[in-house]
């Protein structure tokens, strides 16, 4: 007896939409997403789509109408509930364009709950293009299967970040001058990781950080890592120890 093909197929496109989703409703997809579906994926009437609204999880929709620049999708059923991601923030000093892109993409894939740009004394890139980063977040979530987008916070200077820091949230400071290896750190959620800019933190910034009761120094091995490598390595180590990688 031939096997029944999986439905929807594993190759079904996933995308986030603005409209709230529920069974029996319809949503219109336009703009860049419609262009991609119509002209790259060759989506047609009757094809399935997996849609997320960042509110209620993932839903199966069926294309009911495909015009030149828009698609109308009818929601059939929920396929996954809204996930509960680990309560980990990644606080990072913005770096140059391509490397910043990499941090955003990989941190989203790894499951962080919040992305917090931090302006330090040696930060080269102080202006962060929010629209560009949000687009990368959405694309990464669509690719990796997340049903909830990480929060993108406004950039903040390091002293201001520490001044208002919630004392019940451990701040794991990636200190080039030493610290405790992640497997030995007692820092379950809620927690945050702080990585520095190209060139590292200044002496004054280190003193400020070490004076905060929420800060725990974290070591990332014997080698000096690039800023983007440190951010992702630390996130992966925390997720393996305290996150949802055991499920």
Image: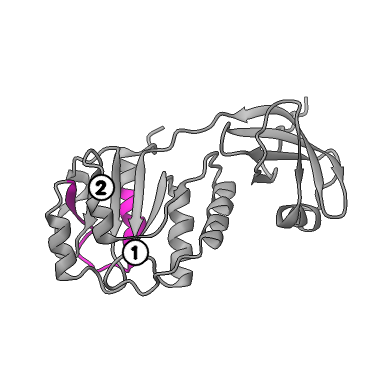
For this view, does 129 lie left or right of residue 204? right
In which quarter of the view is residue 197 placed?
Answer: bottom left
In magenta segment, residue 159:
no
In which quarter of the view is residue 116 placed?
Answer: bottom left
Residue at 65 percent across and 34 percent down: it is: 20
- Quadrant of the image containing the N terminus: top right
Q: Label 1: how many residues lie within 10 Å, few (<14), some (14-19) or many (20+)?
A: many
Q: What are the residue bounds of the magenta stretch?
A: 214-237
Q: Compare residues 210 and 106 and report the one nearer the observer.
A: 210
Residue 88 versus residue 93 in the image, above or below: above
Q: Compare residues 32 and 236 and report the one nearer the observer.
A: 32
Residue 127 versus residue 154 in the image, above or below: below
Secondary-structure class at tag 1: loop
Which residue lies under the disc numbered 1? 93
In which quarter of the view is residue 219 placed?
Answer: bottom left
Residue at 58 percent across and 57 percent down: it is: 135
- Quadrant of the image containing the C terminus: top left
**Which of disc 2 and disc 1 is earlier in sequence?**
1
Residue 117, given in percent of the width and then of the height, sits at: 38, 59
Residue 33, given in percent of the width and then of the height, sits at: 71, 53
Of tags 1 and 2, the one toward the viewer is: 2
The Cα atoms of the two marked residues, 1 and 2, are separated by 17 Å
In magenta segment, residue 228:
yes
Residue 125 versus residue 154 in the image, above or below: below
Q: Compare residues 110 and 137 and report the one nearer the observer.
A: 137
Residue at 30 percent across and 49 percent down: it is: 237
Which residue lies under the disc numbered 2? 165
Secondary-structure class at tag 2: loop
For this view, does 53 lie left or right of residue 190? right
Q: Compare residues 51 and 151 and report the one nearer the observer.
A: 151
């Amino acid at each position: 007896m031939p096997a029944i093909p999986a439905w929807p197929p594993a190759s079904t496109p996933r995308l986030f939409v603005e409209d709230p989703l529920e069974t029996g409703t319809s949503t219109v997809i336009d703009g860049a997403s419609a262009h991609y579906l119509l002209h790259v994926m060759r989506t047609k009437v009757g094809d399935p789509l997996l849609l997320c609204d960042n509110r209620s999880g993932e839903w199966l929709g069926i294309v009911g109408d495909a015009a030149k620049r828009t698609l109308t999708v009818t929601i059939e059923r929920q396929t996954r509930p809204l996930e509960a991601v680990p309560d980990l923030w990644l606080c990072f000093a913005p770096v140059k364009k391509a490397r910043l892109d990499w941090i955003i993409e990989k941190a989203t894939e790894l499951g962080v709950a919040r992305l917090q740009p931090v302006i330090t004394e040696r930060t080269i890139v102080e202006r962060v293009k929010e629209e560009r980063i949000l687009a990368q977040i959405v694309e990464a979530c669509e690719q990796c299967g997340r049903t909830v987008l990480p929060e993108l916070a406004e950039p903040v200077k390091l002293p201001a970040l520490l001044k208002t820091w919630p004392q019940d949230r451990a701040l794991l400071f990636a200190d080039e001058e030493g610290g405790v290896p992640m497997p030995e750190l007692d820092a379950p959620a809620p927690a945050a990781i702080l990585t520095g800019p190209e060139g590292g933190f200044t002496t004054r910034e280190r003193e400020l950080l070490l004076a905060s009761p929420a800060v725990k120094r974290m070591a990332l091995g014997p080698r000096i890592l690039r800023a983007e490598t440190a951010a992702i390595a630390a996130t992966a180590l925390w997720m393996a120890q305290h996150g949802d990688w055991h499920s």
